[in-house]
Image (spheres, rainbow, N blue to C red):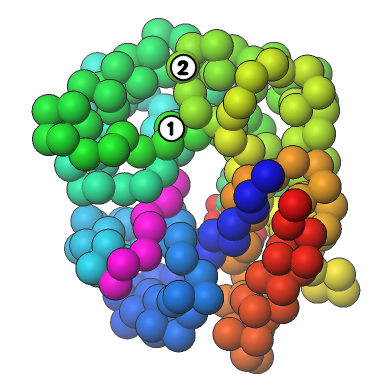
Amino acid sequence: MKSEIVLALDVDNLTQARYFINKLYPVIKIFKVGSQLFTSCGPKIIEIINKKGAGVFLDLKFFDIPNTVSGAVRLAVRHKVKMLTLHILGDEEMIKAAVFAASDEAKKIHIKQPLLIGVTVLTSKDAKSSDVLTLARMGIESGLDGVVCSAREAKMLRDNIKGKFTIVTPGIRPKGSFKNDQKRTATVGEAISAGSNFLVVGRPILEADDPNAAAKEILGEIYARRD
Ligand code: C5P
């Protein structure tokens, strides 16, 4: 199984974002744009990352009525993002509408459709694993490509949900680093052994004295554990 590192670009403006993209690409090949950076720069940031040759993970965690979410998903497809998130709590009808919109729009403009990733329970919150399983199963059965969950739940999901699906795990904390506001954290090794495909890392790299060295260290651990 292949695992990749994703940098959570949780910064305030284009200048800071450019600094990290230029510094860390191609050590890091996927950059996650969340509500903080997107509120500041809008789609311009997607264009910059795509032009660089890297992939965009648009983490806006869509959660709205099916019609609104479908419209947002169509626009994300047009912006050529590699993956995007929506809340599984938005329910089956919303997820199915999003899945249809992504595939329909990608066909129309002849591009590969992005991975649709469902958020189960935020890793800054405590969660019962039965709740995470129920949400993840519903999301996958409704057509999502994968789910976001804590690395602590990833193995339980692999054991209980049949078929191939992608697991994205935030809350990654290299040994000895701060937890910040995250509750359900895991090390890189724990995340990979649990079956995570994309390890989302933000502050341990963004706030490191040497972000490049921090990213390379995490990448080294990933390579060492690849099958
Ligand atoms: O800085 P840190 O490594 O904690 O960043 C984690 C990133 O993952 C943040 O961008 C956060 O929005 C995101 N995330 C999360 N928990 C989820 C889904 C996404 O922490 N369930």
Residue 201, image quadrant: bottom right
Comparing 61 with 186, the one in front is 186
Residue 127 to residue 11: above or below: above
Q: Residue 203: percent from the left, percent from the top?
A: 63, 70
Q: Residue 159: percent from the left, percent from the top?
A: 81, 23
Residue 76 to residue 21: above or below: above
Q: Which residue lies furthest to the front in this view?
A: 227
Q: Which residue lies furthest to the top in this view?
A: 93
Q: Which residue lies furthest to the bottom in this view?
A: 209
- Compared across the picture, whether 27 is left or right of 99 comes to right
Tell me the amino acid under the disc marked 1.
Leu
- Magenta residues span 52-59
Q: Which residue lies furthest to the left in this view?
A: 108
* Camera sees residue 65: no
Please tell me which residue is depicted at 42% across the width and 36% down the height of the picture: 115
Q: Which mark is residue 184?
A: none
Q: Residue 103: percent from the left, percent from the top?
A: 28, 24
Labels 1 & 2 near each other (Cβ < 8 A): yes
- Compared across the picture, whether 37 is left or right of 194 comes to left
Q: In terms of secondary structure, where does tag 1 sit?
A: strand
Residue 66 part of the magenta segment = no
Please report whichever mark, 1 or 2, sits nearer to the chain's N-terminal start.
1
Q: Residue 130: percent from the left, percent from the top?
A: 80, 18
Please tell me which residue is depicted at 55% across the width and 18% down the height of the picture: 139
**Residue named by callout 1:** 116
Comparing 159 with 90, the one in front is 159
- Position of the N terminus, as image quadrant, is top right
Tell me the amino acid under the disc marked 2.
Gly
**Residue named by callout 2:** 143
Q: In terms of secondary structure, where does tag 2 sit?
A: loop
- Compared across the picture, whether 76 is left or right of 210 comes to left
* Camera sees residue 141: yes
